[in-house]
Amino acid sequence: MAAPEPLPILAGDDATARAVWIATTVTEIQTQFLDGIVFDFEAPLLPTDPANSKYVSLVAETRAALHARIPGSQVSVCLAWSPHGVDGRYYDNIGLIEAADLGYIMGYDTRSQVMAQCVASANAALPALAWGLREYMTLGADPQKLVLGVPWYGYDYRCIPQGEQGENGSGRGERGREGGAEGGGQGEGEDGRVDPTTVTCAMELVPFRGVGCSDAAGKQVPYSTIQARLTAGETSTGRRWDGYMQTPFYNYVDLGDGSVHQVHYDDSESLRVKYDLARQLGLRGVGPYTFDDVWEEGEGGREGEGADAMWAVLRMYVEGDIATGEAEIGRKWKEGVDEVGTR
């Protein structure tokens, strides 16, 4: 079960209120015949905020109470893809991991604050996830207490002419496309409209927590919807592959207003590499977010196109059949830095 909002408990110093919160929460878990709780607190905190130590204590005390009431139960805590203050969340990450049974590293939404050029790119770039996980381990996190969260969804971005971004759209001078793919400039015709086959998709400047560009410019889309459009041939590019980010993407034209969109997502190929990374780093496991994203939307939905492949590659990980090796992953990055292919 998801933990109730803990902020009121973290903001005060009332030990009785914290004890009541824990007792009530544990009773609710037992009443609902559940086997655990996940803390998914994502409010910004400064490193010096007293709420940091209170959060660690809350997790530790909840774990002790839950284990005493339900032997074999599990307490997990969700943490950002990097331990270094993502979105202003300067938590005591190592303390939280030690206080819980598992640390669920949310290996997605890595572009909640885009510091570079404001263009569409991968939701869960492999280089970022590999770096973030290693940083956790460098700080002392036990890899056997870490679960890598992976996305079964993507982002749909509307591409705009770069001139519409204004001077703030140029970022900090990264190469033409953050993903490292070839075709650095955005394709625009003589009329200034975005080329439906463009690689570089400039997106609207939507700020988030003090940063002018974020993935809030797009909308989250489940894998079933993403794959359905691709299978139906309703794209202007077909499936493309970003060799550096190790993720797929494609473009399509909105038939309603004629705008060009770029969709970045994960599929069985990109997830296999992430599962391989988890295996090579000795992590406890992986955790898709969310399983129902492979189901068609609406009542009576069924598993959509490509669902079998998503389940198959997850099964391969569970059964230990994924073992490309870290050296092989590095080779793929090197060879794929300038690769954009339609597959």
Image: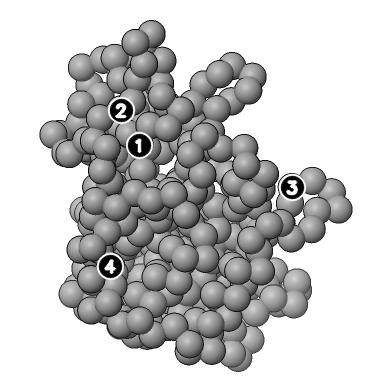
Residues at badges 4 and 1 in contact (C-beta under 8 Å)? Answer: no
Q: CA distance from mark 2 to mark 3?
A: 33 Å
Indicate which label's residue lies in the foreground, 1 or 3. Answer: 1
Spatial distance from mark 2 to mark 1, Cα to Cα? 7 Å
Please give the residue where the numbered disc 2 appears in the rendered image: 186
The residue positioned 64% from the left and 19% from the top of the image is: 256
Label 3 vs 4, first from the N-terminus: 3
Classed neighbour count for the residue bearing mark 2: other residues with Cα under 10 Å, few (<14), some (14–19), many (≥20): many
Between discs 2 and 1, the one toward the N terminus: 2
Q: Secondary structure at mark 2?
A: loop
Q: Secondary structure at mark 1?
A: loop
- Between residue 220 and residue 1, name the one nearer to us: 220
Instruction: Provide the residue designation for mark 1.
Output: 199
Q: Earlier in the sequence, mark 4 or mark 1?
A: 1
Mark 1–mark 3 contact, CB under 8 Å?
Answer: no
Q: Few, some or many C-alpha atoms within 10 Å of disc 1 (few <14, some 14-19, many ≥20)?
A: many
- Label disc, if present, on residue 332 of the rendered structure: 4
- Looking at the picture, which amino acid does disc 1 mark? Val
User: Taking 166 as reference, is 286 above or below it?
Assistant: below
Disc 2 + disc 1, Cβ < 8 Å: yes
Q: Amino acid at mark 4?
A: Lys
Give the spatial CA distance, label 3 vs label 4. 34 Å
- The percent coordinates of residue 277 (x first, y second) are 34, 75
Residue drawn at x 35%, y 20% is 188
Badge 2 amino acid: Gln
